[in-house]
């Protein structure tokens, strides 16, 4: 066995994945880190200042991910690329035996906890491996909103063992892998809040200088034409990379703002409310577009865009003004 060998007995997913959120998942990066930090008994909400930097980039909203520097500042975590010059299983064994975690990009097709995608649908995903038991062909890992295990054929598929169909066909295998080490002491209590606020101020300086909803609004007519032309098969991918990225990002920002208030910080009441307006209006727009695609009746969603554009002004710009970072 490689890793700490502990059985993960937790009360459940972190609060960010509990309750009744508008968006149950953000993306494969954020969902994974929330549960990994939670598993290490660290507070992932403190790492959400980066959400103020989200922008619109032509065909999609920028994807949410916690910067490596923020991880080191808050939790003493260092992340490095893992070179896979030998068998992947051997690399993971070496790292987990040192107490490290390996984040590995995999295919949802081979993950038992991937729901309807399991052995039916191929999609990129990420897992964080902390326990490896080669003699039992078993692996323990964080994924989405919890901690899971895989064994037998699923284990062999994750590590592309001999006999895997892709290997037997001679397919190249260059997995994207990262090693995560807890090198320094993590911040805690008041020090964690101070460090998080420092990151928030730094990220506010890097925020978009123009309302990203305005840029989205300009591009949306072309998006709508493409959605109507391509139909249902293309809709889910569009929704995940545009509307979910937008809505889930601002739902996270709203949770972060409320966490700061719970830590004694005085912030404008309207910021968290506007964040949740952004989250819910993005969901409304997603449902309306789905109905438009199914019915073949285009919906320009102008009122949704009006709501999003107005609400944005009370989120990131309001925080920038509050913290004195409203000047370019």
Image: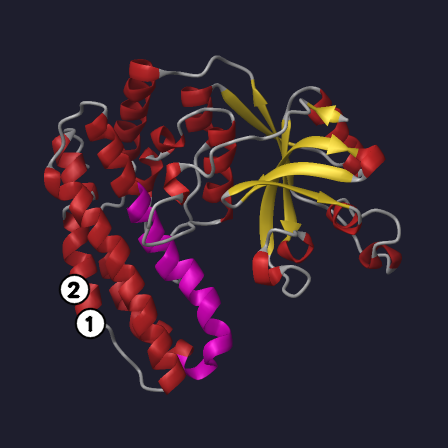
Q: Is residue 327 left or right of residue 46?
A: left
Quadrant where the N terminus lies? Answer: top right
Give percent across and percent down for residue 30.
Answer: 45, 42
Q: Residue at x 51, y 40 (%)?
A: 32
Across and down, in percent, residue 240 comes to: 43, 60
Which residues lie in the magenta part? 228-252
Magenta-drawn stretch contains 229 = yes
The residue identified by callout 1 is 302
Residue 23, percent from left and from top: 36, 53
Front residue of 270 and 39: 39
Q: Position of residue 47 (x, y in %)?
A: 38, 31
- Considering the numbered disc 2 on the image, is that residue within a helix, a strand or a loop? helix
Q: Main secondary structure of the magenta part?
A: helix
Mark 2 = which residue?
306
Quarter assignment of residue 223:
bottom left
Is 326 contained in the magenta span?
no
Circle 2/circle 1 CB separation < 8 Å: yes
In this rendering, position of residue 3 left or right of residue 185: right
Q: Is residue 256 left or right of residue 102?
A: left
Question: Dot 1, how many residues are within 10 Å of its Cα: few (below 14), some (14-19), or many (20+)?
Answer: few
Q: Give the Cα distance between marks 2 and 1.
A: 6 Å
Is residue 60 visible in this depiction of the protein? no
């Amino acid at each position: 066995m490689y890793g700490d060998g502990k059985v993960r007995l937790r009360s459940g997913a972190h609060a960010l994945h509990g309750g009744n959120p508008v968006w149950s998942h953000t993306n494969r990066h954020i969902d994974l880190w929330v549960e990994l930090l939670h598993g290490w008994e660290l507070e992932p909400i403190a790492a959400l200042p980066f959400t103020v930097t989200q922008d619109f980039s032509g065909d999609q909203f920028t994807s949410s991910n916690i910067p490596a520097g923020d991880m080191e500042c808050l939790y003493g975590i260092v992340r490095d690329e893992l070179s896979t010059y030998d068998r992947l299983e051997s690399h993971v064994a070496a790292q987990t035996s040192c107490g490290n975690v390996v984040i590995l990009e995999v295919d949802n097709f081979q993950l038992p906890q991937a729901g309807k995608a399991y052995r039916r649908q191929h999609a990129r995903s990420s897992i964080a491996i902390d326990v490896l038991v080669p003699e039992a062909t078993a692996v323990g890992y964080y994924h989405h909103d919890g901690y899971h295990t895989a064994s037998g054929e699923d284990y062999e598929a994750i590590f592309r063992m001999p006999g895997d169909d892709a290997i037997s066909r001679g397919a190249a295998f260059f997995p994207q892998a990262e090693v995560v080490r807890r090198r320094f002491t993590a911040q805690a209590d008041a020090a964690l809040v101070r460090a998080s606020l420092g990151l928030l101020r730094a990220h506010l300086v890097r925020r978009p200088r123009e309302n990203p909803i305005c840029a989205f609004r300009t591009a949306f007519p072309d998006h709508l034409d493409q959605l109507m032309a391509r139909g249902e098969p293309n809709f889910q991918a569009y929704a995940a990379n545009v509307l979910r990225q937008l809505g889930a990002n601002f739902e996270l920002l709203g949770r972060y703002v409320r966490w700061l208030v719970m830590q004694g910080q005085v912030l404008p009441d309207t910021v968290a409310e506007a964040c949740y307006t952004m989250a819910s209006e993005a969901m409304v727009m997603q449902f309306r577009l789905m109905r438009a695609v199914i019915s073949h009746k285009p919906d320009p969603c102008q009122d949704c865009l009006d709501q999003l554009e107005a609400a944005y002004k009370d989120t990131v710009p309001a925080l920038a003004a509050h913290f004195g970072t409203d000047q370019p």
